[in-house]
Every structure is written in C-alpha cells, then in structure tokens.
Image (tube, rainbow, N blue to C red):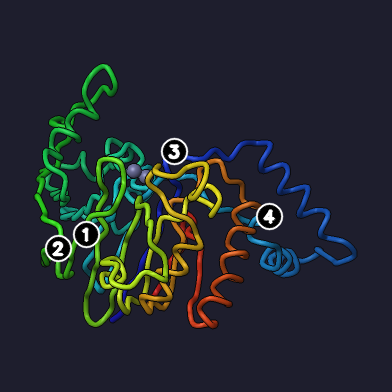
Amino acid sequence: MGMNVRFWGSRGSLPTSCSAATIRAKLLRALELVGERSLATAEERQRFIDELPFAVAGGFGTNTSCVEVASGEERLILDAGTGLRDLGGSPEAGRHPATFHLLLSHPHWDHIQGFPFFMPAYRPGNRIIIHGCHPRLSEVFTNQQKMPSFPVPLAAMAAEIEFVQLEPDEEYTINGFTVTPMRLNHPGDSYAFRIRRQGRTMVYATDGEHKENGDSKGYPFVDFCKGADLLIFDAQYSLRDALVDKENWGHSSNLVGVELAVISEVRRLCLFHSEHTGDDEGLARFLADTRKYAEIYGQGLLEVELAYDGLLMEF
Ligand SMILES: [Zn+2]
Ligand SMILES: [Zn+2]
C-alpha cells in the first residue's frame, strides 16, 4: 500500500483566473498545430489532444493551496485554500458520516479561504479536526466567517469542528499517519509537515523562504527532508525574484528547491505555490528550466514536477 497525493489547489497568494481570452488563445494555438493531420475520427482527435503541450491542452489550474494525502482508506488534507471546495465535491468527501483531518501550514488567506465553501462542514454527523501549530486557530476560522465579511458564521456549520494545537518538532500520529511539523521562515511563520506511513515519506513545505541552499551543511530543513519520496516545495519565485525583487517576502525559488532536494536525497520534487500571475506557457517554461537545472545539479537522480489542480502523484 503506497501513498497517493492529489493536488486540489497549488497557486500561491491568490486564485488565478482562466478567462475567455485565455481559452480562446489555447484553442487558436491548438488549431495552428493541426497542420495536415486528419482529425476525422474520435480516436484521431483524442490522440491529437494527448500530444499537445500541456500548456495548450490543459493548464496549471486556478485554486490556492489544498492537497489530499491518502494511504489505504485513511486521508489527510493539507491546507484549506480554494482547492478545498473541489475536494469537498469529490465522491470520497461525500461519504457520510465522515471524519476529516486537516493540517494547516499557517492561517494566511490563501490557505484558509476555501473552508467556508467546504460542503462536508455543513452536514450534521461529520467531524472536522483542524490541526496546526499556530495558537488560536479557532479564532482565525471564526473571524473569517464573521459579518460583514461572510454571511454564515462558523458556528452555523453543522459538522462538529475541533481544533488541535501541535508543537513544532514533536511527532504525532494523526489518522494513522506519523506527522512532524517544522517551523519555516515566513511572515507570521508557516509550518512544514513531514508525513510518514507504511515506509513512505513525504514533506509538505509551503510558504517558506530558505536563505540556505545545497551548499549549507547542517541546515535543519535538510535533515527534515532526508530521504523523502516526495517534497512539495514553495517555488513561487524565480531566482531573481527570490534574491533581488522579493527578498524577505517569505517564499523560495525553484533553484533553491532543487538544491535542497538533491542534498536531502529526495526522490521527487514537486514545485508548489505557483505565482498567481504566471500563465501556463510561462509555468511550463519554468518547469522545463527547473528540470534542466535538476539534470545538471542532481545528476539525473531527481524527478521534478510542477503541481496543477488535479495532479495525482503515487509512490
Ligand atoms: Zn500562501
Ligand atoms: Zn503565507
């Protein structure tokens, strides 16, 4: 039994739009690529779409942070960004009665704003347990749904909602997973989670600015990630953004992600918390550039992905 990780939202700071103009541009690009080939049958059309670049036939999605981790029947939800609304509509989330364990990296808007739209929270008999290292998380969730900002107060959600305070660097068992939080450098702090179950290990490390890179021996984050099968890493910025324009904004670059993953002997790196202004072509280039760097820096041992809404990773 392995681990499945499904991305429901992977944008940073703010949801991203997908306007009519964006879709029209993708359609035009696709039609340009038809060339002489026949699209007469359903199979030919399907194959043509499958062969198009991902940025043309698909896209990196619009929702803010929400990731579902499953191992057998057990699940964890990481963050409650707008992706949580879509997770709430999935068949698994529709089972009733159910208990949901939500781990919160930090209470910035983009990590909590999906919660008022999480339909299972409105069903009596469901139980939602929100785990996090920040104090007073119940106030954070209550205040988000106070008038005049939102019409339905938290107390009106019919599920039982509980809050559990975690301490960094302590090990917990949550719904059958072994979970260790670690503080990250971010305005107001964010916490990464190392999650283990049945010999599989993943690290969810979003919203963190790493001043160290692969040359830094003894950096605690390297130990924290050591040997993980998957590292989900805040790579909102390019190297230039991270070092010059947006230093101290609390996020990291793709290149620092590669270096830390390689020195930590991580098998797969998933770039996450993508820049909300980034278009699909730009993000596809960002991924291609990161893969080139990983090829050189990691001698081909590190696999790199860029998260998108709907991506499923199994290991
Ligand atoms: Zn964020
Ligand atoms: Zn943040």
Residue located beneath label 2 in the image: 169
Image label count: 4
Q: CA distance from mark 1 to mark 3?
A: 24 Å
Residue at the image point whose x is 66% and y is 67% from the top: 50
How far, Cα to Cα, is label 4 from label 3? 23 Å
Q: Residues within 10 Å of mark 3 (few under 14, many from 20)?
A: many
Q: Is residue 186 above or below residue 228?
A: above
Type of the residue with mark 4: Val
* Residue at the disc numbered 3: 14
Secondary structure at badge 4 equals helix
Tell whether label 2 touches label 1 (CB within 8 Å): yes
Closer mark to the observer between disc 2 and disc 3? 2
Is label 1 in a helix, a strand or a loop?
strand
The nearer-to-camera label among 1 and 4 is 1
Q: Which mark is residue 182?
A: 1
Q: CA distance from mark 2 to mark 3?
A: 29 Å
In this rendering, is residue 217 above or below 308? below
Figure quadrant of the N terminus: bottom left
Nearer-N-terminus badge (1/4) = 4
Mark number displayed over residue 265: none
Amino acid at dot 1: Met
- Please identify, in this view, whether the residue under mark 1 or under mark 3 is nearer the observer: 1
In front: label 4 or label 3: 3
Q: Which residue is mark 4?
A: 56
Looking at the image, tell me whether mark 2 or mark 3 is earlier in sequence order: 3
Residue plotted at (14% across, 42% down): 159
